[in-house]
Image (cartoon, helix red, strand yellow):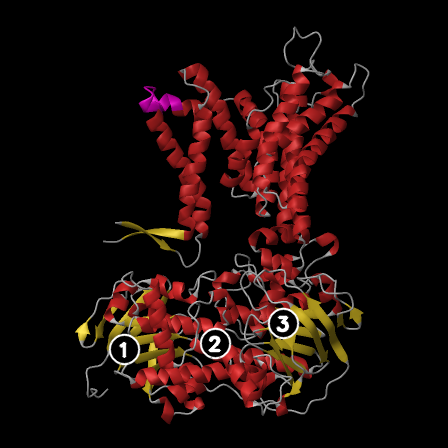
Amino acid sequence: MTSPPTTPRLQLTGITKRYPGVVANSNVSLTVAPGEIHAVLGENGAGKSTLMKIIYGAVKPDEGTVRFNGQPAHIRNPQEARALGISMVFQHFSLFDTLTVAENVWLGLDKSLSLNEVTASIDATAAEYGLDIDPKRPVHTLSVGEMQRVEIIRALLTQPQLLILDEPTSVLTPQAVEKLFVVLKKLASEGCSILYISHKLHEIRELCTACTVLRGGQVTGVCDPRQESNASLSRLMIGAEPTALEARVLNAGAAVLAVQNLTLASDDPFGTDLAAIALTVRAGEVVGIAGVSGNGQGELLRALSGEDRRAPAGSIRALGQDASRLPPGKRRALGLHFVPEERLGRGAVPTLSLAHNLLLSRRDAVGAGGWLRLGVLKAQAEDIIARYKVKANGPGAAAKSLSGGNLQKFIVGREIEAKPKLLIVSQPTWGVDVGASAQIRGEILALRDAGCAVLVVSEELDELFEISDRLHVIAKGRLSPSIDRADATVERIGEWMSGLWDAPASNNNQKESAHAAA
Amino acid sequence: MLRLEARPQPSARWGYASPLLALAITVVIGVILFAALGKDPVRGLQVFFWEPIKSTYALSELMVKATPLLIIALGLAVCFRSNVWNIGAEGQYLIGAIFASGVALTATKETGAWIIPAVILAGVLGGMLWAGITALLRDRFNANEILVSLMLVYVAIQVLNYLVYGPWKDPMGYNFPQTKTFESVTQMPRLMQGSRVNIGLLIALAGVAAVWVFLFRTYSGFAQQVGGLAPAAARYAGFSSRKALWIALLTSGGAAGLAGALEVAGPIGQLTPYVPAGYGFAAIIVAFVGRLHPVGIVFSAILMSMFYIGGELAQSRLGLPKSITGVFQGLLLFALLACDTLIAYRVVWKK
């Protein structure tokens, strides 16, 4: 690299970090200039998080040097990182629900300021960056987007010279993402450097001025994302271009799942109550449900899968039968199969072998009198491993020994091989690398073409636009009417995510309040 | 400095080696203990590990003590694998013994051999009933099964005391708190002349096979364990957690009750306040040392039985208090829990 005109804000040279059995970072170098928004792009497991933890002092590198503003830095813990001027906003928020915004921020700062002073500086910072938030509100009343604002304000109050954001948009509506980008660009223009970790290519191309791509713990490229295309970036990231799925003409058959007037109070005090959900999925179509997480997706899926059997009688009809009160096993017997979003612990038992995990949803290897035919079970697992290209140490490998993507391929394979008539999939490719994602989506579409009805719940709009024939949006426990994919736009779906599908799209005032709610 | 480093995969080798290492550590601490008490450590070890196996008779006595431990621990293995923590096997054992005694006391000189299965069945039912109370309270009111089952042990002891000091006291027994000696027809048939080993041992070994088949070869055994390993996965699969709770407690309660019946109608031959010998608690250690695996439990039950016999011998031969048995049991469990760290972690030397 040519030497930048000024001293780099952050310079990593030859960083290597080994964990037992895996090299997380191998000879990684990274240079961030002052005022630069620098993307760190890579698939899950590429070593992004380890690298950020090294910068933030949470993990010590085995080899390599870190220079901050030209000075060698040995950051031993996050406190030292903050003292240097490095702040980090984590993907998972660390806020106390019962405390107010100001109290939460105050807790994270050194104790030189009073709560009143902190409240005042929150107001000042919020006004300066357009991060409107009331410091006196308890955190549990905030939306996810607002919680993220609290985290960002908390980071900003330490006056960072380098702000690290880990997958910040995974929980935001498209409109909230736009607002976040405005804030980040303003921060950068004031000289704060930003490290932006993501695997979303279009965001990086829109926001960042430099990009370091990681693959398998190594740097595979440094580029200016504004000069690149999605295809060239993903080539750097995964070494190949994902195959594009082709559009098709919808020819849906009879209704396989019909949900009507499903109203259900959540059994979790912090959950979302479902209100009059109506939904139809026909044979041979994929229906997508978009929405920011925590808007009732979990509750709806548990009611559909049978894990929650309190749905009012007649509200859920599957394959012509009233399934509202049926246990999961009976629903599977009807042909309803379900891929839950949590793979370890729900979709699979972590300590059991892949073969035994088949028994959670399949009974093919159960003989007369409940006797297990282990040979059949093993063959079945081997078959799925081969057909779905699952990287695993054979059918005896414990579920927890697989990477998230490989376990997901196995679970999706398990459900698809059951030849379902109705498949419900939650977050099919969450945390799954690009190659495996494309494969899983392809399998779902192949199943659809074979005449299966498919319902997909996802937070990734790109994914839903790619595979769905029709879309719904879930917000605050209510489900929007369905919209054909051809008629849906990201803007419209984004608005609906705030619960405003009844309002005319041209009404600007309501649009504004929708943004505030996000 | 020694440090623990997480293993990427839990070690299968240490899974088997850790109980052996724990035993070795227990022996080393035992040697230190004997030396500190001014006893010859070699003699001490001999009493615990050689005397119980040195003759056919000693071996048969070893089996007599190992049988109830094995039966109770088998039931507990099913229970603990289902993530249900029945700590009150001692109470279920006692109620099983009481129910069995109730049937045995009805026997007269003319009673036929049918009384044997009746006694056994009564013991099983008694244990199930006692564990069923815990299951009901847990199921209905979400009461903590650890506390409930443990407290019911002390209730069971009082029930026993009431019976042997009250209505069931032998009128010809010189006012000793005990029932009359059961008719010989109720005695569990012995397997050979000159030893106290009875059909209980065969029942226990059949139990080993049955539990192994249930856990590892049947669908219901699989469903039973999923709830313990990953409750959300059990819900996803549609395995009922209530069913698993009842199966777990009724199995372990029934097993403990069976052991109680075999004991009162076997080696003891009457109901006395000394029936509670701590088998129900020792079986918890047996179950864990045996890795909750039926075959492992066979070995750990024999080991624990050695501690019982060794403790008694240490009393007469070395003049040590009987509580030495408890000390050894505790040491073994403690060392095992410490050694189990090695399954998930490895020790590395780092500066």
Q: Position of residue B157 (x, y in %)?
A: 61, 25
Label 2 element class: helix
Say left or right for B109 vs A53.
right
Q: Which mark is residue B73?
A: none
One can see residue A427 in this view: yes
- Residue A68 on image: x %, y %: 22, 74
Q: Quadrant of the N terminus of chain A?
A: bottom left
Q: Tag 1's secondary structure?
A: strand
Q: For mark 1, what is the residue?
A: A29
Q: Which residue is mark 3?
A: A477
Chain for numbered disc 3: A
Q: For the residues carrying marks 2 and 1, which lies nearer the camera in this image?
A: 2
Q: Quadrant of residue A238?
A: bottom left
The foreground one among A460 and A372 is A460
How many neighbours does mark 1 have within 10 angstroms: few (below 14), some (14-19), or many (20 or more)?
some
Q: Amino acid at mark 1?
A: Ser
Query: For mark 2, what is the residue?
Result: A170
Residue at 69 percent across and 49 percent down: it is: B243
Q: Is residue B32 left or right of residue A293?
A: left
Q: Mark 3 or 2 closer to N-term?
A: 2
Span colored in magenta: B34-44
Disc 2 to disc 1, C-alpha distance: 26 Å
How far across and down, in percent of the image, does residue A333 sit?
74, 65
Work out whether residue A177 or residue B333 is closer to the camera in this orientation and state it: A177
Which amino acid type is marked by label 3? Gly
Cα–Cα span, label 1 and label 3: 46 Å
User: Residue B193, image x and y in percent?
Assistant: 64, 19
